[in-house]
Image (cartoon, rainbow, N blue to C red):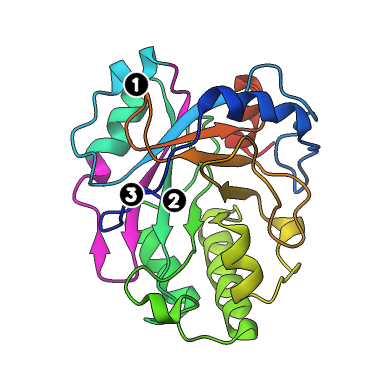
Amino acid sequence: MARDRKPSRHRARLVAAAAALSAGATALALALAEIPAAAASPAKGHDVSSHQKNVDWPSAKAKGATFVYVKATESTNYVSPSFGRQYNGARAAGIIRGAYHFALPNKSSGATQAAYFVAHGGGWKADGWTLPPALDIECNPYDKKHGCYGLSKAKTVGWIKAFSAEVKRETGRRPVIYTTAHWWNTCTGSSTALASTHALWIARHESADAGSLPAGWSYWTFWQYDNSGSLPGDQNLFNGSLSQLKKFARGY
């Protein structure tokens, strides 16, 4: 993810990424957008944090950006200084945008971090321009020896459930879950408890497709396939067309 204090990841290729969509089997549940098995025109997007600072949003729009996720918060002591400018700038340029929270489960409870996130930009409304809030949960970047944050598999699942429940209570939407298959299967014990109620945002770089998904998911909704490219920040695809992306944003 394009976090504020994160080392670069390796590249993949947009052409290979788009071509790989034909292999995806997808039918979104949970009153989200229904997405066909092979999207003819996958919606292109990106995600940004304070690394990108002053984004040229009209330029991003002209280069094909239809959506963006913007980092809002991390744990309960950090709000991106660029969040408001980026979030509002994307909307002004006609780009569908949403906010994401970087989880540090070893710092405080899921419910506490969710409340902090929603209070600092992680909201949602059915205006067609706002993506559901997203939870970025991945290997601990501050302590590689404790990639699962020192939590047991059961406690990790419980933490995510608590975060999700609070976001749902405050916004009416379940968060999208951003993760990698390796982290998820390792740190949750390949839990399948959340797949049926949460859209997946899979991170997989240097690959022609999204690869094996975390346990429980049979399709991805967003795929982060590169950490640089034509758009500012990380490069992403939505597993569907622009019209389906708009339906997903509205909650249909």
Circle 3/circle 2 CB separation < 8 Å: no
Q: Is residue 64 above or below residue 38?
A: above
Q: Nearer the viewer, mark 3 or mark 1?
A: 3
Badge 2 local density, few (<14 within 10 Å), some, or many (20+)?
A: many
Q: Any mark on residue 123, and which?
A: 2
SS for dot 1: helix
The image quadrant of residue 38 is: top right
Examine the rendering and report whether any part of residue 240 can be seen.
no
Task: Identify the residue under disc 1.
Answer: 60
Circle 1/circle 2 CB separation < 8 Å: no
Q: Nearer the viewer, mark 1 or mark 2?
A: 1
> Rounded to the nearest whole Å, what is the CA distance between mark 1 and mark 2?
23 Å
Q: Any mark on residue 144, and which?
A: none
Badge 3 local density, few (<14 within 10 Å), some, or many (20+)?
A: few
Of residue 96 and residue 187, the one placed in the foreground of this image is 187
Q: Which residues are magenta?
A: 64-84
> Rounded to the nearest whole Å, what is the CA distance between mark 3 and mark 2?
28 Å
SS for dot 2: loop
